[in-house]
Amino acid sequence: MPDILHKIGIQSSVDEAYKALTTREGLAAWWTRDTLDESEAGGTVRFRFWGNQGFDMKVLELDPGKRVLWQVVDGPEDWLGTKVSFDLAQEEDYAVVRFKHAGWKAPVDFMHHCSTKWGMFLMSLKSVLEGGTGTPWPNDIKLDKWEVEAG
Amino acid sequence: MPDILHKIGIQSSVDEAYKALTTREGLAAWWTRDTLDESEAGGTVRFRFWGNQGFDMKVLELDPGKRVLWQVVDGPEDWLGTKVSFDLAQEEDYAVVRFKHAGWKAPVDFMHHCSTKWGMFLMSLKSVLEGGTGTPWPNDIKLDKWEVEAG
């Protein structure tokens, strides 16, 4: 099964990176402003875009400073059951984030889009943690016409 | 075998996008300033970064307004033999680019990096074609410490 893979080094500590991946405020600063819940192991975090659309993620693993693993329990059909992980490692003064969105059934068109979009959001995460401005939805860089029109 | 996939919509014509993928000047504006050759089917284009490092791409297919296919014939071992394709489609006033970097033997760490980096460069392509500024190497967004240090 094809996976979306990314890696980004952030001039930050893994503890700061972990916070940005596991608190409502942290997630809202780089992925979507409409992050509706705090993360708790076994709980569900709802991420919304364009009103009521989005993804519900069950939090499968929370390993402070090391790893976050979610599974999609509600959202677009292509995403259902897929798993999203963030593995963190401190490499000198950089927090290195290795990202995987695994379990896609096929390399569908939406997977191509999501790959580019995850890359953009990870750059948003990097920017926030390095003292710049994040570009969480709805301030994200729109990659396609339908995104521009959806707002 | 794992592939890097991306998709990006550009407010442009496929003809303009094709030019940006098949001329030395076009490629130098979004990928690397040190694009050393013009593209010709059957020929080789040398892309350089940090002096003499980079990739030599054999141009396997050039289908105007539709498709560009390269194969890596020299460069880092992980890249050797891999294929890079750009499929273009005009969707209303957008040129949609579907990108694939196929043939990686394994999902190595460098593949994660290259996935994020290709996404960044495709956003650079979009920016150039929409009248903004490209971020080709050496003006690219550095994603890792080693990139910052390499310059």
Image (cartoon, coloured by chain):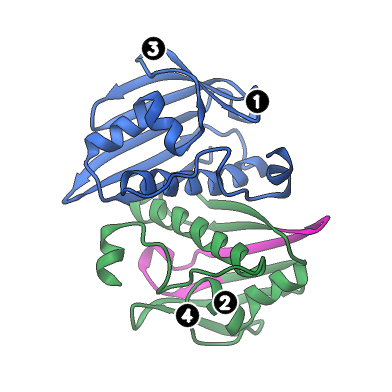
Chain colours: A green, B blue
Kindly identify which chain the residue marked by label 4 belongs to. A
Q: Which mark is residue B42?
A: 3
Q: Nearer the viewer, residue B65 or B110?
A: B65
Give the number of marks. 4
Where in the figure is residue B18, as x and y percent of width and height? Answer: 29, 32
| Mark 3 or mark 1: whose residue is earlier in sequence | 3
In this view of the protein, can residue A65 be seen by the observer? no
Q: CA distance from mark 3 to mark 4?
A: 48 Å
A83 magenta-colored: yes
Mark 2 and mark 4, same subunit? yes
Mark 4 is surrounded, within 10 Å at the Cα level, by few (under 14), some (14 to 19) or many (20 or more) other residues, namely many
Amino acid type, mark 4: Arg
Tell me the quarter of the picture where residue B5 sits: top left
Magenta-tinted stretch: A71-96
B102 above or below A114? Answer: above
Residue at image x 31%, y 57%? A144
Q: Which mark is residue A27?
A: 2
Q: The C terminus of chain A appears in which quarter of the rendering?
A: bottom left
Q: Which residue is tagged 1?
A: B51
Where in the figure is residue A26, as x and y percent of width and height? Answer: 61, 78
Q: CA distance from mark 3 to mark 1?
A: 25 Å
Mark 2 is surrounded, within 10 Å at the Cα level, by few (under 14), some (14 to 19) or many (20 or more) other residues, namely many
Q: Which residue is tagged 4?
A: A33
In the image: residue A78, left or right of residue A45: left
| Mark 2 or mark 4: whose residue is earlier in sequence | 2
Q: Nearer the viewer, residue A103 or B102?
A: B102
* Residue found at the very far bottom of the displayed protein: A37
B148 above or below A141? Answer: above
Q: CA distance from mark 1 to mark 2?
A: 39 Å
Label 2 close to label 3 by CB (< 8 Å): no
